Amino acid sequence: MARTVLGALLNRTATATPVPFVSRAAQHAFGMFGNRRDAVAQMRAMGSVGTLFSIVNRTSNATAMVDWKLWRKAPSGMKEDRVEVTRHAALDLWTKPNPFMPRQEFVETFQQHVDITGEGWWVIAYDLRSTIPLEMWPVRPDRMTPVPSRERFLDGYVYTSPDGEQVPLGLNEVIFLRMPNPLDPYRGMGPVQSVLADLDATRYSAEWNRNFFLNSAEPGGIIEVPNGLSDTDFNQLRERWNEQHRGVANAHRVAILEHGAWKDRKLSQRDMQFVELRDVSRAVLREAFGISAFALGEVTDINRATANAAMAWFAEQLTVPRLERIKAALNHDLLPLFGATSQGLEFDYESPVPPDPETEAAQLTARSGAAATLAAAGWDRDDILSTVGLPAMRAATRPSGEPSVFGALAARLLGEHDPAGIEAAMRWVAMCKDDDNSCDPCRNNDGQTYRNRAAAYKDYPGGNGYIHCVGAKHGNECRCTVVKRRASKEDDE
């Protein structure tokens, strides 16, 4: 049975590598690397600052919604030649990291940690009878401590449980994602760390506003009494005042004072600037995360074009870098744990960047122009489509003997109104798809050359279908074509 998260942290397998405990002296010798006392405060800020919650919620959700696939690498090294792998233990683990979390929740949880603290931790659980990973659990960054090593750089990790127990974990039991910390090679650094003071100011300003309204939306004042009050009189005055005037529901009630006078305190310019502090902190947070105001719902002047551009920018600049970090962890840290069965495999994500219609239109125009040029040079149609990256197409047949789409487009690109000049320098050759379905007339005419287009199109109207095809006479479609090719010296002879 696979270990649960408790077993993964408290009941380690016998095959796990022992990790020595790091003393305070050893930590001091390494310059106190690996400590994160600020992580709790950073994570707690997400629940107290609305702007921070909105940013982290959007980035982590966008990252978790992306689909992933497992691929077998192609010898050519090109992505389009890869073969998808639909059954593998690593794929099953990534789809369902543990019995209580689907992949979406797992990714969203550790991505929150990365966005806030700059660190994301996966603890790997194994079966007692196997070395294959069976579960993955996200762990809070403040509970994990790397164990530095003078010889190997890193010996392992120590997990601190909620009751204070320190549990050693081996290198094969932890996968660490991070934004590198320039001061600590063992830890990460997140954007929240750079704006903690602004987050505190935002929280304090929110509390100030709350107290302002709880105090009847009045700035407060002073009750002056001519003589000193006894403890009994003071407590009685305070209790009566709170009972009659404290809270929004008691706002603007008339106060009756037996032994004192009310001195009002006006709202100063300093207080008015304090109210505006939250707007300043919101801009600072957006700058730290590199996120636009539109992504947080702050819409002023928007149309469909700018909205689509904002969506593409968010995916390209914010989501893709986070996915690349996860991709590196999957391919370089998780897959090797599955041994020889993972050789030649790689995880990859479906791009979240929406297509750009203008860019696609420009690419189609460029590919069509290249196809027309190659067609004019006499290359095979299927080879042309494969070379320029166009899908398979069937050339339209012109009953009047007009040129095909490729031929007409080539004539326009080359500035030829009369293709006679091209035909003089070209030969036309019949091409038959020779298999069990080919008839004898088509097979016998395979390779037949023609001096010009008129002669070729006489036997192959529109460039497709041999007029003597047996199958065509019985209502079937002939698969033969006639294409141009360069005239050679041998042909001339």
Image: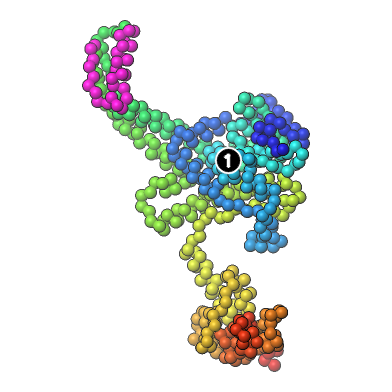
Q: Give me the residue at 36% from left, 49% from top.
A: 300
Q: Is residue 71 above or below residue 143?
A: below
- Quarter of the view holding residue 15: top right
- Can the viewer see residue 323? yes
User: What secondary structure is the stretch in magenta mostly built from?
Assistant: helix
Q: Give me the residue at 68% from left, 55% from top.
A: 85
Q: Is residue 61 above or below residue 187?
A: below
Tell me, yes or no, whether the highlighted magenta stretch contains residue 148. Answer: no
Q: Secondary structure at mark 1?
A: helix
Residue 231 is situated, as x and y percent measured from the top left of the image, at: 34, 7
Query: How are the residues colored?
Result: rainbow
Q: Give me the residue at 51% from left, 37% from top.
A: 192
Disc 1 crowd rating (10 Å Cα; few below 14, some 14-19, many 20+) is many
In depth, the one of 141 and 10 nearer the eye is: 10
- Quarter of the view holding residue 166: top right
Q: Quadrant of the C terminus?
A: bottom right
Q: Which residues are magenta?
A: 231-259
Q: Quadrant of the N terminus?
A: top right
Tell me, yes or no, whether the highlighted magenta stretch contains residue 234. Answer: yes
Residue 306 is situated, as x and y percent measured from the top left of the image, at: 41, 56
Q: Is residue 16 above or below residue 444?
A: above
What type is the residue that disc 1 sits on?
Phe
Q: Is residue 389 above or below residue 251?
A: below
Residue 258 is situated, as x and y percent measured from the top left of the image, at: 23, 12
Q: Give me the residue at 31% from left, 22% from top.
A: 246
> Does residue 291 appear left or right of residue 275 in this picture?
right
- Quarter of the view holding residue 378: bottom right
Disc 1 target residue: 110
- Can the viewer see residue 178? no
Residue 140 is situated, as x and y percent measured from the top left of the image, at: 59, 34
> Does residue 77 appear left or right of residue 257 in this picture?
right
Tell which residue pokes out farthest to the bottom in this image. Answer: 493
